[in-house]
Every structure is written in structure tokens, then in C-alpha cells.
Image (cartoon, grey):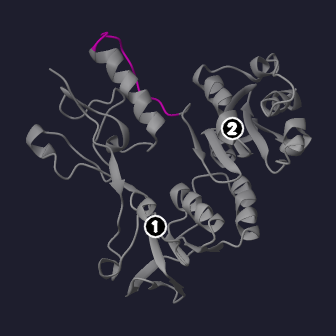
Amino acid sequence: RRIVIATGSSPLVPPIPGLDTVPFETNETIFDLRERPEHLLVIGGGPIGMELAQAHRRLGCAVTVIEGARVLGQDDPELVQVLRDRFAEEGIEIAEDAMAAAIRGEAGAIEVEARDGRVFRGSHLLMAVGRRANTDRLDLEAAGIETTGRGIRVDASMRTTNRRVHAIGDVAGGLQFTHVAGYQAGLIIRQALLGLPAKNRTDHIPWATYTDPELAQVGLTEAQVRETHGGNLEVVRFPYSHNDRAIAERKTEGFIKVMVVRGRPVGVSIVGAQAGELIALWAFILANRLKMKHVANMVAPYPTLAEINKRAAGAYF
């Protein structure tokens, strides 16, 4: 009676002239390499590109990240700057506003030419420009299921244009995270098995970029809040350098930034050690529409990084 499409996504390989003539890796194939790349060229400065760039640099490879706009463009620029500084310290070259126009060469000697004429040379090429929904072989038109440029069209209940069919995860064209697919699966189970209403929402969905330091976000960034709430925004910051656990472990780089509107957090950005762990509390706060007073009432064990969340609430008051 019901069908759920959960076919996921695959690495996006854009039609850059010459790409079909040179060997390249994706995030699904690069782990098959058994010899260290001498110089890895990474096209794409999103989370996948930045994570793998840093990993390969720390394995001893020269690394150049080639990004058509700005690296980690979906995240708060103030936090991204902390990562940019770390990448520069580690010797990773970042080329921005460098839209790839042509690729040429052979294994061990690959060139990427940008639209502005810059040429980047390396031994290996990693394509990390995003992912595309796996819909090619589904024959969706036969079932009356519409698609968009990002994937299958769904409503707030994750139902497609065929009422008997739902789509979840990457193929549904929304946020592309494993934990989002799991969350949406729960929505389907509530509807299909329990007969309960369930609507998809994204304002409480966190994400993390697993660089060092980590970068994590839930809700709106500061720029988004200023655009939607204007003068009602209050921004609260607290640095890792004032946390005793961070000091003891020599991980004092980074800070938390909480965007508050009328006492209620609407977005949280964290850059620093275990940011992906710390963001979970704020995902809970946003999911249940709680206020800063509820975080302030919490007692965190000492000494832990979790005290950073508590201290941010204290700073607000």
C-alpha cells in the first residue's frame, strides 16, 4: 500500500571539459588508494573537500583546494575564518573564486585551469563538488512522481506527487546528512504504521564538519537571523580559551556563538574541539523551542567542554 524511496545519492561529477580524459577520485573511491598522492588537487571547498584536504595534508601530501566561490560557504564566515587560519598553518593552499574551466593531463600530472586563467598542477584529482540524487534508473514518470533539480519533490509529510509513495534522505533533495535520513524515516513510520500526523522540519537539524577544529551549526546563522529578525537579535559568545578542560588538553582554539531572539536561541554556531558533540544540546533546545533560561538552569560536570554551553547561557544573562 505504501512505498518509500530511499535510494540516497552519489558523488556529483560536473561536465568540466577534459574531466572525462583524466583519472579522478571521489569520496567513495579515494579510500582505495594504496600509495600516498604527492600533490592532491581538490575541486570543491565544501565539507567533504575540506575534511579530505586536511586528512591528506596530515598524511604528508601537498594539497590544493580549488573552490569556485568561498570555502564552506554555507557556514558562518567568522567561524570559517578559524578553519582557514588552521589550514594555512598546516600548509594547505586554498584558491577561491577559481571556477574550474578545463582539466587536462594524465595520471601523476594533472592540470586544472580556472576561468580566470590560473592553472593548478598536481598528481591526483579529487572531485568534491557535492552529491546528486539517485533517481536515474527509477522510471519515476511512470508512477507520476515529479522531480526537481535536487531530487524528488516531496511535501511536508515527505509524500511525493504520488500519494502512495514517500521519499526520504538524500534522494528527497533536502539536507544531505545520514541523521536527517534517520529522522525522516521516523516520520514515515509514525504516519504509515501508527497513523499519526508527522511533518518534516529543518530548523532543529544540526550538522558538523569534521575538520580539526570541528565546525557545527544548528538553526540560523548570524547573517540569516539579522535578515529575518533585525534589531531583535542578541549575539552571545564564549571562547574555548576560558574553559578549563580545553586549557588542560591544549585545545583552546575556537568559540561558541548563540543567536538569541527574545530569550529564545534561534541558531548556534560552534568552532572548536568536539563541536559536533556540543551542538547536540542546542539541537535539543531548538527542537523543543526552549529558552536560554533552561540552558542556564543546567549543571554541567567539571571539567568538561560541555561547560562551554552553560557558560554561553550565563554570558547571556
The residue where tag 2 is placed is 268
Q: Nearer the viewer, mark 2 or mark 1?
A: 1
Q: Position of residue 296 (x, y in %)?
A: 82, 21
> Is residue 277 left or right of 235 when viewed as pictured?
left
| Residue that appears at 71% across and 59% down | 83
> What residue type is disc 2 on?
Val
The magenta segment is 193-202
Q: Is residue 181 above or below residue 157?
A: below
Residue 294 within the magenta-colored segment of the rendering: no
How crowded is the residue under tag 2: few (<14 C-alpha within 10 Å), some, or many (20+)? many
Q: Is residue 41 above or below residue 59?
A: below
In terms of depth relative to the viewer, which is nearer, 240 or 268?
Answer: 240
> What residue type is disc 1 on?
Arg
Q: Quadrant of the N terminus?
A: top left
Residue 224, disc: none
Point out the residue furthest to the left here.
142
**Quarter of the view holding residue 155:** top left
The residue where tag 1 is placed is 34
